[in-house]
Amino acid sequence: MAQDVKAESPILDHEVFAGRASEMLDRVDALRDESGLPEALRIAIEQFVEGESHPELKKFAEVILVARRQALLQQQLDDDRSQLHSGRLDHAERVSTGHHYEMLRREACEYNHLLRSLIESCGQYFSRGELDGWLIRASQGRRDWVGGEVVGAVSEIALHAALQGLPELRGLRYASVDEDLRGYDFVATWQGQMITVDAKTGFYQPLSEEKLGHRHLEISVPRESVNGFRVSRRGLDLLRHEVRQTLHRSASVQSHGPHTTAVPNQA
């Protein structure tokens, strides 16, 4: 009698992710000694990304194994930006450098979305410190790059959680990559009109402006309002208060000022 054979799908938990991270990074280290880092990463990606059928483990492997490329890409972006603002390029050079810069921006943005998606779907299985450590090792010590990437992703997740608690915002969703490249992280409808929101980090007052023909907000997420991958109760209250205050502000704020910390008592 024929017997159904099903590929075993691992039950995701901390041990699965920690074990997979160790396996991938050890594999890269071993291959690097034999073939050099670029070839080591190519083989590891072929094995752990292209050869993985589980969607979350595939996403995890991609986030980790392309970290070095993304860190170097960020340096290229910084170099291109510096050249474009240097005033030293002729027209042809500006066009060429600008095209290269936009290609790199898209790739960086796609990675940002992938990292955020991984944290949202699997962040319960590993700590923020563990993810930082894996990315630092995978990127060959690019600690500042790792910090910026993870802080940015967590800030978006925190603001998304806050915006979800505002029933006056209809059809809330994350921006697509193309929309993100135009400067916003979220899209919603408020009072029948399209509104976009960009998540910032640090201590600044909200910014409200017209952008590409619609209302646009920039809301900063203080690092102190987030613990690990989760926004605190006070952080949610602060963010929701600031979004509401900004939505109902009649005059646009043209520049950021110090972030407010007072949150009205909740009824």
Image: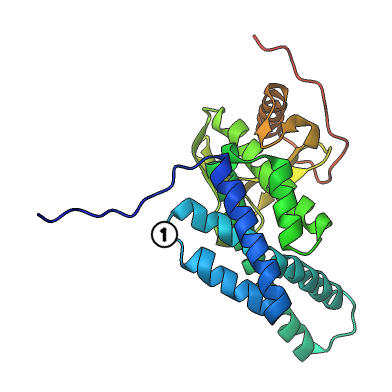
In depth, the one of 67 and 247 nearer the eye is 67
Residue drawn at x 78%, y 74% is: 76
Relative placement, left or right, of 173 versus 197 is left
The picture places residue 182, in percent across and down from the top left corner, at 64, 60
- Image quarter in which the N terminus is found: bottom left
Relative placement, left or right, of 169 versus 233 is left
The picture places residue 252, in percent across and down from the top left corner, at 75, 41
Decide: is 207 above or below 240.
below
Instruction: List the residue tagged with mark 1.
Output: 53
Q: Residue 80 occupies which quadrant of the picture? A: bottom right
Q: Is residue 222 visible?
A: no
- Image quarter in which the C terminus is found: top right
Residue drawn at x 53%, y 56% is: 59
Residue drawn at x 13%, y 56% is: 2
In depth, the one of 3 and 86 nearer the eye is 3
Name the kind of residue labelled 1 in the image.
Ser
Residue drawn at x 90%, y 84% is: 88
Decide: is 107 above or below 265.
below
Q: Is residue 78 visible?
A: yes
Decide: is 130 above or below 27.
above
Density class for disc 1 (Cα within 10 Å; few <14, some 14-19, many ≥20) is few
Is label 1 in a helix, a strand or a loop? loop
The picture places residue 128, in percent across and down from the top left corner, at 70, 41
